[in-house]
Every structure is written in C-alpha cells, then in structure tokens.
Amino acid sequence: MRKPFVAGNWKMNTNGQTSVQLAKRIAAGSAETAGHGVTVAVCPPFVYLQAVTKALSSSSIAVGAQDMYFEPDGAFTGEISSSMLKDTGCTYCLCGHSERRHVIGETDELINKKVAAAISGGLLPILCVGELLSERQASKTNEVVTRQLKQGLAGLSAEKLSAVTIAYEPVRAIGTGVTATPEQAQEAHDFIRTLVGRMYDGRAAEEIRILYGGSVKPGNAAELMGCKDIDGLLVGGASLKADDFLAIIQAAV
Ligand code: PEP
C-alpha cells in the first residue's frame, strides 16, 4: 500500500515571519492526519528552512528543500549542498522542478546528479517531470516524460530508487489555474508506473509514489486523489494558504 503524500512548494514566497506562521497553522490544523494517514511536507525557501523546521519540530510534518547542488562542498557560490540541508532538518528535496528546468535552464544530466547526490546525502528526492504545452500538442508527452525519467534516474539501483518520489507536473498546469483532467493525469501516471516497471521491476513500480502537481486546489484534490495511480499531490499556490492546504491534505487521507 502506498501512503498518500501531500507536499507544498512555497517557491520564492513568504518571509521570516509569514513562513513560521504558515507552518504553525498547517501543523495545528493537521495534527490528526499528518504522519498518520498521509505524509505531509512543506518546502520553504532555503533561508527559512531552519525556522520552519523549528516551528514544526513537535509535528509530523516533514520539511523539504526546493533544490540543492550535487557537489558536497567547495567553490560553488550561491549553492547549497545535501549536508547543509540535512543540517537544517530537511528530509526531502525537490529535484528538476519545471521552473528549475525551464526558467533556470537545468538539464536532465544536472538533475540526475542532484537526485543521486540527494540520496547519497540521506535526503529523499522528489523528481519532477512533465511536458510543456507545445510538447503535449505535438503528442510528445510520453516521449518527454520517458527522457526525463530515464535520464533523471540514470545509474540508480532499485534500492536507491526506493528513496525517490516522482512528481508528474504538466507545465501548462503549473500556476495557471488550468489543471490536467483526472483522466489525463491518470493516463500519465499509469504510463510512468509502467515505465518504472520496465526500467526496474514490478515491485519498484508498485511501491513508488507518483504525485500529481499543477493547479491543485481544495476543489479538485479529491477527484485527482481518486485516480488509481495518483498517490499524492505537489501543491504550489494553494500551499501558501493554510486553509486550502489543510483541505487538500484532508482530501488525500
Ligand atoms: C508547483 O509549484 O509544483 C505547482 C504545482 O504549482 P501550482 O500548484 O501553483 O500550479
């Protein structure tokens, strides 16, 4: 049985005060559910990780980073290593979020190094994949997702894969209010699970959690979670409103 997983990606939002307030409101409102029926994580900006981890210390909500660099230390100005993230109390790390791929220009090769380094450093990577609108219109969704998964997971053993969560996020649905239909999302998740089965084995396919992301809201969370291969939700905008995020967590239980 795959435990549902809801993760909030705060992106470049909040400040020192509002990050802690948001974390505390989410913890208070999910005391009965987080960590029991559903895994919950929040991914604040790097500079608030420590404060948010402290604010959540008596809750079952995990903290994740939005990115990391693959080198352990050294002359990499502006970058953050896995051990630094571990130091702040992080459990998870997003790797290859679409904004990193398409705004910052990260390649599959770089993302693969991050996934591998996250696991070696004791973090649980959430590998994000998903096609652009133009790629969907050109019927290239499966081709793009196959490339992102094969390259993103290159060199990882089945044992290491057990540390990985996959997030399918069609880029046209991120931050646009236009979510994929449950049928489109289920089709892509089924494709991803089948591909993992081909790349590894049936057990790996059965065990891996695949989250859907892209304009998830309280009003569509339950329907998405009702799809057979959707194991959880990666939430951007709605994770910045405690009441909305709590309603989404409730829909995933
Ligand atoms: C995201 O940032 O991963 C995301 C899915 O954003 P939103 O929910 O705002 O579309």
Image (cartoon, grey):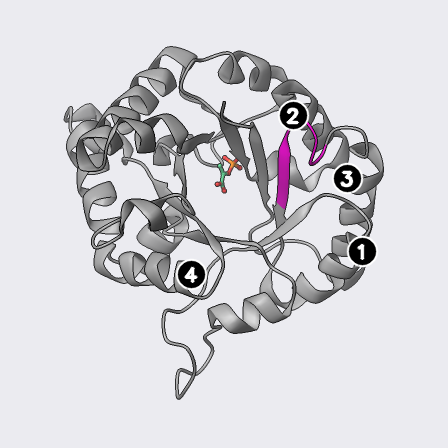
Number of marks present in the image shown:
4
Which residue matches tag 4? 118
The spot of residue 91 in percent (x, y) is: 57, 55
In the structure shown, which secondary structural element does the residue marked by tag 1 occupy?
A: helix
- Mark 4 / mark 2, whichever is N-terminal: 4
Please indicate whether residue 18 sits to the left or right of residue 177 in the image.
right
The spot of residue 46 in percent (x, y) is: 59, 65
Residue type of the residue flagged with mark 2: Ile
Which residue matches tag 3? 26
Which is more foreground, mark 2 or mark 1? 1
- Spatial CA distance of label 3 from label 2 is 11 Å
Residue 46, relative to residue 226: is it above or below? below
Q: Residues within 10 Å of mark 4 (few under 14, many from 20)?
A: many
Q: Are marks 3 and 2 in contact (CB under 8 Å)?
A: no
- Mark 3 / mark 2, whichever is N-terminal: 3
In magenta, the rendered stretch is 34-41
39 part of magenta stretch = yes
In the structure shown, which secondary structural element does the residue marked by tag 2 occupy?
A: helix
Which residue matches tag 1? 55
Query: Which is more toward the observer, 100 or 187?
Result: 187
Q: Inspect this view and state whether residue 99 appears.
A: yes
Name the quadrant containing residue 146: top left
In the structure shown, which secondary structural element does the residue marked by tag 4 occupy?
A: helix
Q: Residue at x 77, y 46 (%)?
A: 22
- Spatial CA distance of label 2 from label 1 is 21 Å
Q: Inspect this view and state whether residue 106 appears.
A: no
Which is more foreground, mark 4 or mark 2? 4
The spot of residue 18 in percent (x, y) is: 78, 54
Residue type of the residue flagged with mark 3: Ile
Which residue matches tag 2? 248
- Mark 4 / mark 1, whichever is N-terminal: 1
